[in-house]
């Protein structure tokens, strides 16, 4: 290995170290920004090293350089524009698109490497490695699955579970075709068979995500993110790039751990995610009718009285808060209540919103103190002591129907909002949540419904509390 090669490899190791340290610093909000900056610095170093390799090799034509720089500039411009203009509510869709781009790019690396060596039998045999085939399959699944997930989140594709007779059989057939084709390629290299493997993997990505519905989408996003990292790591093995291997392994491992945590929070199994039909509930159970009752509406003044004279208030943020971009309004209301000596905390369900950590990021943007954000296991025992639980758009994660069999969310751990002494729900209408079922919390005798957009409702509540204080 030449001196130049040693320097490049050392730069890659340094870049990978930045990724590891950056990920560690992202564990806490206090150091998250520094971790992001460190990871960005590592990526810049890796890109510069890659360009240095290309220049040193001098194997790219002028046309190739033009294409490469044009692609880099267009991609950078699109990424910068998207990052600056995307709404917080569209972040899950953006993450899905990023997953698709990452998985697709990784698959193309392996496909190009395979086809480029297809001129001779020896070349194809050299290209037919386990890592190449894994890269192709995982990358293709990630690409098509992430596109479907983004379409569902954006409303371009039916968000409800989309199934048809024999859909599970089609799902399994696509998976077996891809795996069988990959095994055949190891024994007998063939470009046409590689195309079959690619098509089968793309089909599996579609059939895996289409049946997903309900409140399960955050778990799927985590899973596809783990797939992206794994595909990138395989691409690193294909082209012999240390930085790519380590970066992909980090994303794959962290995404896998997060997927397991999210699946546990939803009381779902990873096996069901892979097989399909995930998120459609326990179809084998007999549904038990939920409690009936009347819905009681409340005005801002009455709700403000409950909040202003409470001793303990738990705020439960959900997708309605994100959709209305009302994080600053809820933070202002909470600060006002705290000035009156009221104990305020936030109940954060692992899958509140449409992606992992959605509510944490949203509230951090409004400078809500991180210690006030309490996870489900920590906050649930506190609900019986709460005078008021203020629910803002959180639907499925507060639905007592999860405690009964036969519903789309049966068995899903929920926030025990119904154990609070009084409940105020801010919601625009009685429309069902992402799981498509009615929330039994809304007919609880302790529940009052404040029908309004989250931002305007919180603004009215804050003004009404200030009037009481004055």
Image (cartoon, rainbow, N blue to C red):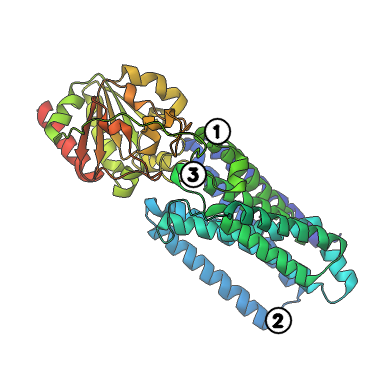
* Number of numbered labels in the structure image: 3
The x, y position of residue 77, in whole percent, is 48, 67
Residue found at the very far top of the displayed protein: 385
Spot occupied by residue 126 in the image (x, y as percentages of width and height):
86, 65
SS class of the residue under badge 1?
Answer: helix
Kindly indicate the quadrant of the structure image that contains residue 55. bottom right
The residue depicted at 20 percent of the width and 41 percent of the height is 451
* Residue at mark 3: 280
Q: Is residue 411 above or below residue 131?
A: above
Q: CA distance from mark 2 to mark 1?
A: 52 Å
Q: Find the distance from the CA under tag 3 to the CA under tag 1.
A: 16 Å
What SS does tag 2 mark? Answer: loop
Q: Which mark is residue 264?
A: 1
The CA distance from mark 2 to mark 3 is: 53 Å
Picture coordinates of residue 229, whole percent (x, y):
64, 51
On the image, the x and y values in percent for residue 260 come to 59, 37
- Left or right: 325 with respect to 61? left
Crowd band around label 1 with a 10 angstrom C-alpha radius: few (<14), some (14–19), many (20+): some
Q: Nearer the viewer, residue 45 or 420?
A: 420
Instruction: Determine which quarter of the picture holds residue 102.
Output: bottom right
Depth check, front residue: 60 or 168: 168
Nearer mark to the viewer, of 2 and 1: 1
Q: Secondary structure at mark 3?
A: loop
Residue 61 circle label = 2
Residue 112 in sight: yes
Task: Give the answer, above or below, for where 75 lies relative to 281.
Answer: below
């Amino acid at each position: 290995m030449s001196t130049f090669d040693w320097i490049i490899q050392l730069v890659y190791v340094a870049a990978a170290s930045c990724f590891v340290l950056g990920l560690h610093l992202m564990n806490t909000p206090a150091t998250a920004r520094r971790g992001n900056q460190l990871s960005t610095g590592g990526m810049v170093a890796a890109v510069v090293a890659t360009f240095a390799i290309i220049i040193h090799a001098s194997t790219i034509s002028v046309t190739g350089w033009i294409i490469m720089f044009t692609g880099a500039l267009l991609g950078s411009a699109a990424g910068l524009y998207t990052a600056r203009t995307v709404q917080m509510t569209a972040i899950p869709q953006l993450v899905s698109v990023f997953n698709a781009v990452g998985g697709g790019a990784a698959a193309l690396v392996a496909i190009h490497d395979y086809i480029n060596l297809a001129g001779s039998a020896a070349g194809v045999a050299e290209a037919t490695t386990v890592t190449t085939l894994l890269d192709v399959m995982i990358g293709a699944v990630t690409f098509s699955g992430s596109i479907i997930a983004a379409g569902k989140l954006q409303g371009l594709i039916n968000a409800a579970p989309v199934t048809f007779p024999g859909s599970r059989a089609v799902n399994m057939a696509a998976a077996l075709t891809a795996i069988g084709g990959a095994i055949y390629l190891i024994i007998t290299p063939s470009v046409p068979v590689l195309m079959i493997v690619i098509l089968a993997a793309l089909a599996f990505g579609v059939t895996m995500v289409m049946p997903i519905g309900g409140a399960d989408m955050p778990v799927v996003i985590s899973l596809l993110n783990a797939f992206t990292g794994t595909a990138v790591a395989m691409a690193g093995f294909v082209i012999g790039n240390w930085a790519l291997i380590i970066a992909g392994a980090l994303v794959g491992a962290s995404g896998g751990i997060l997927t397991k945590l999210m699946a546990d929070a939803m009381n779902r199994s990873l096996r069901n995610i892979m097989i399909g039909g995930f998120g459609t509930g326990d179809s084998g159970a007999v549904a038990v009718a939920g409690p009936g009752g009347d819905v009681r509406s409340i005005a801002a003044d009455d709700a403000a009285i409950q909040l202003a004279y409470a001793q303990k208030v738990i705020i439960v943020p959900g997708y309605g808060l994100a959709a209305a971009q009302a994080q600053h309004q809820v933070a202002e209301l909470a600060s006002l209540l705290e000035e009156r000596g009221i104990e305020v905390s936030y109940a954060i369900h692992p899958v509140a919103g449409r992606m992992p950590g959605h509510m944490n990021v949203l509230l951090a943007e409004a400078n809500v103190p991180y210690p006030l954000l309490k996870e489900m296991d920590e906050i649930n025992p506190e609900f019986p002591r709460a005078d008021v639980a203020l629910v803002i758009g959180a639907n499925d994660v507060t639905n007592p129907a999860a405690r009964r069999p036969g519903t789309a969310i049966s068995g899903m751990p929920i926030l025990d909002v119904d154990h609070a002494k009084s409940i105020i729900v801010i919601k625009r209408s009685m429309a069902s949540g992402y799981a498509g079922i009615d929330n039994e919390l809304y007919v609880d005798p302790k529940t009052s419904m404040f029908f309004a957009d989250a931002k305007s409702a919180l603004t009215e509540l804050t003004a009404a509390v200030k009037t009481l204080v004055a």
